[in-house]
Amino acid sequence: MLAVVPPPVTVRVPAKVNLHLAVGDPRADGYHDLVTIFQALSLTDEVTVATADDPGVEVHGEGADSVPTGPSNLAWRAVRVLAEHVGRDPDDPKVRVVIRKSIPVAGGMAGGSADAAAALVGLASLWRLEVTRDELADLAGKIGADVPFALYGGTALGTDRGDRIVPVLARHTYHWVLAFDRRGLSTPEVFGELDRLRADGDPPRVGEAEAVLEGLSSGDPRQLALLLGNDLQAAAVSLRPNLRRTLRAGVNAGALAGMVSGSGPTCAFLCTDGDSAVRVAAELAGAGVCRTVRVAQGPVHGARVVGTEEAPRPAPPEVHA
Ligand SMILES: C[C@](O)(CO)[C@H](O)COP(=O)(O)OP(=O)(O)OC[C@H]1O[C@@H](n2ccc(N)nc2=O)[C@H](O)[C@@H]1O
Ligand SMILES: Nc1ncnc2c1ncn2[C@@H]1O[C@H](COP(=O)(O)OP(=O)(O)OP(=O)(O)O)[C@@H](O)[C@H]1O
């Protein structure tokens, strides 16, 4: 009898921005304790997993040339971790992974982590596994600190390495403009630069996460804008001084506030509403301070199967600088 090959599964997964990112001292394991508030944005990658005799990874779209297709690809690491967990051979998982990227590579928006989370959700469906999202989140934390959040999406508090996730209620939709830089930044280098800045002086630290949580519950973007903060911003700007100009240009264009997203170099600008975001995006693109400008909304849900039949969605609006 012929074995039935299950159809490929496609998962859509969001980028993140950190509304609040408080970084503690370096730990013995090379990580830093974090208190962070994530928000998932409507800038998404799509990852398709399929049963195949020629296993491997293909990458298309935004920054595809700089994404490894070998064992260091984070989606492939997810395949291996899940295969091992369910007793399949991680060296021969008989899976092909196709990644269509819109999230900037090494941009501080957790694009690689998103692809790993998508691969976990896609394979759980392809292999018809009885696993809960919390079980997947435990596996996700083994792949990288940002991977668990991409499973949940929404708005959430992250503690420990940023991988312990508690959802936060945020019903209001926020409108963002994202400015992609010409080159990426390495996350460990940015954490290292913060340690160096702190050894030399005392760069300002963000306040308490509670104020941001209250700001979120108000639903007023003007109030939230006053509370956004990122301890890694000083380090990212120190490594990439041109970001100062980008941040200034976004605020001059009418954004309520601008910040470096995570470890950078992408800058995220919070706007009053959707119309304002489109105006800010157009003006920022004209200022010539960055490579590409996009608008996005948040929060959106985490990694989700979009099925096998659905036609490809048009990419979110893009304005070339
Ligand atoms: C900056 C953030 O994007 C904020 O959400 C994350 O903290 C980064 O998470 P990530 O890229 O998934 O990080 P991982 O791939 O797990 O770790 C890469 C490197 O970043 C540094 N790292 C990451 C997370 C953390 N809490 N402390 C760290 O010091 C470490 O040098 C680590 O070796
Ligand atoms: N699927 C993937 N997509 C993008 N980068 C990947 C992927 N797999 C591995 N990488 C490698 O990981 C590095 C970091 O990529 P990523 O796009 O996740 O950075 P990031 O958004 O700054 O991450 P974070 O915000 O989680 O710190 C890249 O330079 C790339 O070499």
Image (cartoon, rainbow, N blue to C red):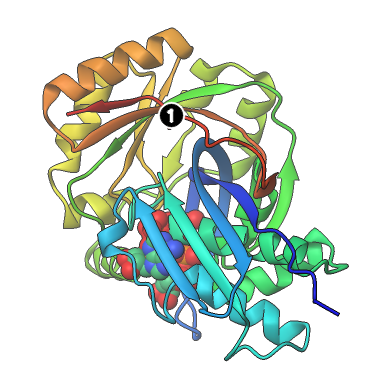
Left or right of residue 73: residue 279: left
Give whichever of 90, 53 is nearer the camera.
53
Task: Answer above or below: position of 238 versus 87.
Answer: above
Give whichever of 224, 15 is nearer the camera.
15
Q: Percent from the top left, x then y, of residue 243?
A: 19, 41
Q: Percent from the top left, x then y, of residue 154?
A: 66, 39
Q: Residue 251: name its quadrant.
A: top left
Q: Residue furthest front?
A: 1
Q: Is residue 144 visible?
A: no
**How many residues crowd mark 1 within 10 Å: few (<14), some (14–19), many (20+)?**
few
Give whichever of 146, 64 is nearer the camera.
64
Q: Is residue 59 visible?
A: yes
Q: Residue at x 19, y 53 (%)?
A: 183
Number of labelled discs?
A: 1
Position of the N terminus by quadrant: bottom right
Q: Residue at x 67, y 91 (%)?
A: 89
Q: Residue 290: name its quadrant.
A: top left
Q: Percent from the top left, x then y, of residue 60?
A: 37, 54
Position of the C terminus by quadrant: top left
Identify which amino acid the numbered label 1 is placed on: Pro
Q: What residue is shown with label 1?
A: 316
Task: Answer above or below: position of 134 versus 284.
Answer: below
Which quarter is ligand 1 in?
bottom left
Q: Residue at x 11, y 28 (%)?
A: 288
Left or right of residue 104: residue 211: right
Left or right of residue 171: residue 14: left
Q: Secondary structure at mark 1?
A: loop
User: Is the shortest distance between ligand 2 and the CB of mark 1 under 8 Å?
Assistant: no
